[in-house]
Image: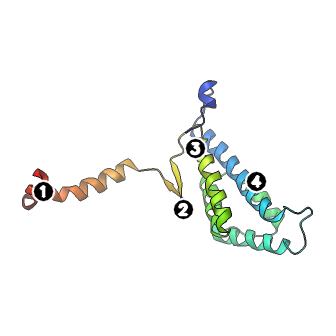
Amino acid sequence: MQNDFCKRFNIPIDLSGAQRHFMNRIKNIIHLIIYEMYHSFLPLPFFLEPKKTRLLVLIANRVGKKFHSVEDFERSIDHEENFLEHLHLVEALYVYIDEDRKSELGGLVEDAVSESAFDLGIVWRNGRFYRKGAPLLDKKLINESLGILRDKKYENVIDA
């Protein structure tokens, strides 16, 4: 269910505002998952730093970003303002984490989508984002698929 806070307080929000809020949620989720994986010990033990670096290099590689350092990459996530890049980052993170964290990440992402004050037109399924049903595409597929039934040799199928 979509967050109704804006509705209750009559706060106008448009798609770009909803996307900005969603991107902030995604940034928080990415940082949370990575923090839980590598910073449950304070300070970060020297033997975990290479694993964290490896994860971030793999994510950067998957989304086509140049990796300089852990700090630079984390900063680049914080400063990223492209909606689709955020979706890509989450999908990349999902690929490289264990099954328990995949489940946690999936739940957090589903919550982030449902908490949006505006329909973002996306759904999260099995570690990937998809556009919500494209009505024109659906209509075209249905019309083409069912259009074959207009042929006279299938008229009994229509009557059945």
Tag 2 or tag 1, which sits nearer the N-term?
Answer: 2
Residue 19: mark in rendering: none
Task: Looking at the picture, tell me which residue is in the foreground, 1 or 82.
Answer: 1
User: Residue at position x 79%, y 69% from top?
Assistant: 52
Instruction: Please tell me whether mark 4 or mark 2 is closer to you in this view.
Output: 2
Which residue in the protein does label 4 denote?
78
Measured in 3D between alpha carbons, the distance from the residue under mark 3 to the one under mark 4, in whole angstroms, is 22 Å
Which residue in the protein does label 1 denote?
157
Q: Amino acid at mark 3?
A: Ser
Tag 3 or tag 2, which sits nearer the N-term?
Answer: 3
Q: Looking at the rendering, which quadrant does residue 102 occupy?
A: bottom right
Q: Amino acid at mark 1?
A: Val
Mark 1 vs 2: CB contact within 8 A:
no
User: Residue at position x 60%, y 41% from top?
Assistant: 116
Which residue in the protein does label 2 denote?
126
Q: Is residue 131 left or right of residue 17?
A: left
Describe the element under mark 2 as helix, strand or loop.
loop
Tag 3 or tag 1, which sits nearer the N-term?
Answer: 3
Q: Amino acid at mark 4?
A: Asp
Task: Looking at the picture, tell me which residue is in the foreground, 66 or 30.
Answer: 30
Q: Residues within 10 Å of mark 1 (few under 14, many from 20)?
A: few
Q: Residue furthest front?
A: 100
Residue 114: mark in rendering: 3
